[in-house]
Amino acid sequence: MTEYVDKVTGYTVRRYTEGPERNAKLYFTCENFSCDDRYFFFMKQDTPGQHNGGCFRANVETGEIERVTDAAYRGFATDREKNIGYTCKNETEVYAVDLNTCEMKKVGDLPKGGQITGHLTAADTGRIACSYHLANKLYALVILDPGKEAEVVYQSDYRLGHAQICPTDENLIFYIHETEGDAFQRTWMFDVRERYVRPYYVEHPSEWITHEVWAADGQEMALMKLDPAGHVDGSKGEVHTGNIIIGDKDGRHFDVAATSVQLLHPCLSRDRKWLCADRISYLGTEVQEGVVLIERATKKCKLIATTGSCKTGADHQHPSFNRKGDRILFSNPDENGNAQVCVIDLEQVKKDW
């Protein structure tokens, strides 16, 4: 672990990893920290010719790094409330990981011959859900209840991804139609009991919706509404291309929570008072990439950390809060564009907010 002062923002940042391989934080759509915020988790890419990758945990204070799983495991994600992680081995074997001891216990199997298309997610009842590519090449939503066999609850010939079961309602699974770009209708909500699917945010032809995430209490979702053409903020003369909108659980009401320059991946603090997002060059517009903090009550948006430019989507910053909400974890692409994991303490930011 090393510390450096950001040359643009002036804030101190801790950097925990270095290359040449990618060391990327978990995706922003799951918790990245243990329940006590002592550890955060990240994925290390194998060094060519070596089998040294997998999921690791880092002690936030000391920087000590320990391996949790090897690279044979995929889809690692942490529970919203319990100190448990979930991961897949050999594509279909599901394991629960004790985040205190790193001990692993098999809890079930996903359908044979398939593979997950994102990370695993879990509701407060213990139900695990994921988007899945079946052996017959159809896409599906799959649930795995404690002590039961996995069940395919929905199938589609669309490529399904970003599945996230509602943290506090095991009956609702959010998912998307993955196009790796714009979609006519990207966001969907599936009712497990009724086997009923409906659009979540109903898109108009000119809209571009992306990168959605549940609040930890399952009452809201944050998502990006991109404006490729942009609009000018008269007060600053900035061309705003990114809007964070927040919708209620049912997708009936949406508010604009922030409007700024080149925002992409949003995340809510657990108390829902703060948002963070990454600022990335895209759609032909180049900016200083980095991480922004947003106060929801005032919609104030401030760049708090600058980063390098990412080589791939896996190297995006994907910022997210710790459970207490006083730190943000993010990936900072190095000189080769490979993600390296960093943390910024928000106390220094809020002192001059």
Image (spheres, grey):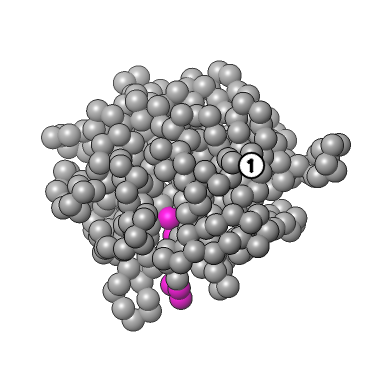
The vertical placement of 270 against 6, above or below, is: above
Name the one closer to the observer, 97 or 153. 97
Position of the N terminus by quadrant: bottom left
* Residue 24 on the magenta segment: yes
Image location of residue 346, percent across then percent down: 52, 45
Give the x, y percent position of residue 221.
50, 30
Quarter of the image where one finds residue 207: top right
> Residue at image x 81%, y 44%?
238
Image: magenta residue range: 19-25
Whether residue 224 appears in this view of the structure is no
Determine whether the residue tagged by mark 1 lies in a helix, strand or loop: loop
Amino acid beneath label 1: Asp
Quadrant (top left, top right, bottom left, bottom right) of the C terminus = top right
Q: Is residue 140 left or right of residue 243?
A: left
Q: Is residue 2 visible?
A: yes
Task: Name the residue rendered at 55%, 18% in the picture.
Answer: 252
Considering only vertical position in the picture, is 5 above or below 202? Answer: below
How many marks can you see? 1
